[in-house]
Image: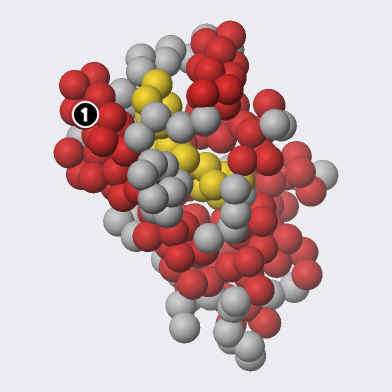
Amino acid sequence: MIAEDLVLLRDGLTRLLRDNEIEVVAAVSDGEGLVREVIALRPDLAIVDIRLPPSFQDEGLRAALEARRRVPGMAVLVVSQYVEHTYAQELLADGRGGVGYLLKDRVMHVADFLEAVRRVAAGGTALDPDVVAQLFSRRRENGPLERLTPREQEVLALMAEGRSNAGIAESLVLTVGAVEKHVQSILSKLDLPQSPTDHRRVLAVLAYLQAD
């Protein structure tokens, strides 16, 4: 389902998703409607604008978190006009995966947006590259990230976006085996545990990047 107050964007998203064989069960304009429809319809995924009426601050995020609490397992993909790292951290805080944070400009890149929708709906993560870049810029000086090679930092940034090893390999023109070795090295250098699921791996990395 979709929660977006701008009619043109709400209708455009609905049409785009339906044209790509993704069922849209409801489209609402405010947080109250989001929670109500989620409880009634129990969708697999909610795409939510962070800023919804009446104050246009964080009503969308609050409603999405409440809806996720009411319907455990529902995935949430929030969209925002700005990079707001505090909201990204709050969205990721429960550590369950099935979350995403994209800038609205990214919605215009149809293939990337649809990939993010499907990844989040499947329980993974999808963070906008600009959000990841800001998290990296806030990292501790002289911390373990400084141990990483330039290539490992590139791999880490793509991991934080939610990409699989195969996706990282394609982006950096590497073999999957080479990426796996880089990932193992990164997790070892950052003292992060191995995990059988991609979203747990990403959340662990993000938890490290966000630490003071």
Q: Is residue 79 above or below residue 201?
A: above
Toward which corner of the image does residue 48 lie, by quadrant? top left
Question: Residue visible at 53% across and 18% down?
Answer: 11
Q: Position of residue 41 (x, y in %)?
A: 24, 19
Location of mark 1 (residue) = 36
Of the residues shown, which amino acid type is indicated by label 1? Arg
Q: Position of residue 107 (x, y in %)?
A: 64, 34
Q: Position of residue 15 (x, y in %)?
A: 56, 13
Q: Is residue 55 above or below residue 87?
A: above
Question: Residue visible at 35% across and 15% down?
Answer: 25
Q: Going by the image, does 100 lie left or right of 178?
A: left
Disc 1 on helix, strand or loop? helix
Callout 1: few (<14), some (14-19), or many (20+) C-alpha neighbours within 10 Å? some
Q: Nearer the viewer, residue 4 or 39?
A: 4
Toward which corner of the image does residue 72 lie, by quadrant? top left
Which residue ends up furthest to the front in the rendered image? 54
Question: Residue visible at 68% across and 40% down?
Answer: 105
Q: Going by the image, does 102 lie left or right of 48?
A: right
**Can residue 62 be seen at all in this image of the molecule?**
yes
Q: Nearer the viewer, residue 206 or 48?
A: 48
Tally of numbered discs: 1
Q: Going by the image, does 17 lie left or right of 165?
A: left
Question: Residue visible at 67% across and 82% down?
Answer: 146
Q: Is residue 204 above or below residue 2?
A: below
Q: Nearer the viewer, residue 17 or 209?
A: 17
**Can residue 17 be seen at all in this image of the molecule?**
no
Q: Nearer the viewer, residue 146 or 68?
A: 68
Say which quadrant the N terminus sits in: top left
Q: Position of residue 195 (x, y in %)?
A: 41, 55
Report the coloring of the rendering. secondary structure
